[in-house]
Amino acid sequence: MRDPISNPLTSVTLKNMYSDLISYYEDRAKEYEKIYSKAERQSDLLVAAQILQDLFAGKRVFEIACGTGYWTEIIAKTAHSIVATDINDAVIEVAKSKIYSPANVNFQIADLFKLENTNKYDSLFGGFIWSHILLQDLNTFIDIANSLAEKGGTVVFMDNNYVDGSNLSITGKDSVGNTYQTRTLENGTTHQILKNFPSEIFIRQLLANKVSDLNFINLQYYWIMKYRVL
Ligand SMILES: C[S@@+](CC[C@H](N)C(=O)[O-])C[C@H]1O[C@@H](n2cnc3c(N)ncnc32)[C@H](O)[C@@H]1O
């Protein structure tokens, strides 16, 4: 039997990785928010919601990869306004079916790697997208995120800690060190999905000299990172 962890993905698989990831989330749109029903994560989710509401209170927020608007709805309780974007129409449609208040919320379909929006915002938020960025693209990803916030503005990312028994196990690792999970949708299809679990030390090293006031909050199931744009 092959060791799945040391089994590198082929370059062809890697080349199609982002398009596979995007179509996976398109197909998952209607079932996506079941992930937020996991019993063991409920107290972390409450804490995270409070942290995000405090961080974005009164702010003009640009959100990348907003998905079905789960966090948009939470942030809208305290933010001034949110421009929430995602590459997938299917998730934006789910997001648009909700009511957001009191913040003014606008949704746009946009690829975060090809944003044409040149406005700058008080704050940027990206929930559960960091883990889906190839390690070799993280510097570009961070530069894009930082370019959307004003100087001194706040950038916030939230993502998963790997917790055995709560997260799907890692079933693949490529030559760069990106890790992959095998995920099954309710329609029975299976997908190899890029999912990295960076350590706080890795993130701090990556962001050194690029940002200021980095604050890393480690919950049990999630991490939340906040920093200021130089
Ligand atoms: C794990 S979901 C997170 C959704 C939401 N932020 C949340 O936390 O519930 C990842 C989202 O990233 C979106 N996405 C993936 N690649 C993207 C890209 N290049 N530009 C914008 N959105 C992207 C997917 O469509 C999906 O909705």
Image: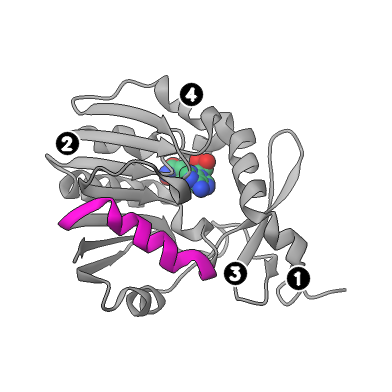
Image location (x, y in percent) of residue 192 = 70, 55
Q: Quadrant of residue 95?
A: top left
**Residues in magenta, as a range:** 135-152
Residue marked by disc 3? 178
Check the image and tell me how it is coloured.
one colour
Give the spatial CA distance, label 1 vs label 2. Answer: 44 Å
Residue found 26% across the figure and 78% down from its top? 209
Cα separation between marks 2 and 3: 35 Å
Residue 78's tag is 2
Disc 4 marks which amino acid? Glu
The image shows residue 147, relative to residue 86, as above or below, that is below
Residue at which label 1 appears: 4
Q: Nearer the viewer, mark 3 or mark 1?
A: 3
Tag shown at residue 93 = 4
Q: Position of residue 124 (x, y in %)?
A: 28, 49
Question: Residue 59, percent across and down?
Answer: 15, 42
- Residue sitting at 18 percent across and 25 percent down? 102
Residue occupying the point 38% across, 42% down:
116
Q: Nearer the viewer, residue 132 or 77?
A: 132
Q: What amino acid is at disc 2?
A: Thr
Circle 1: element type: loop
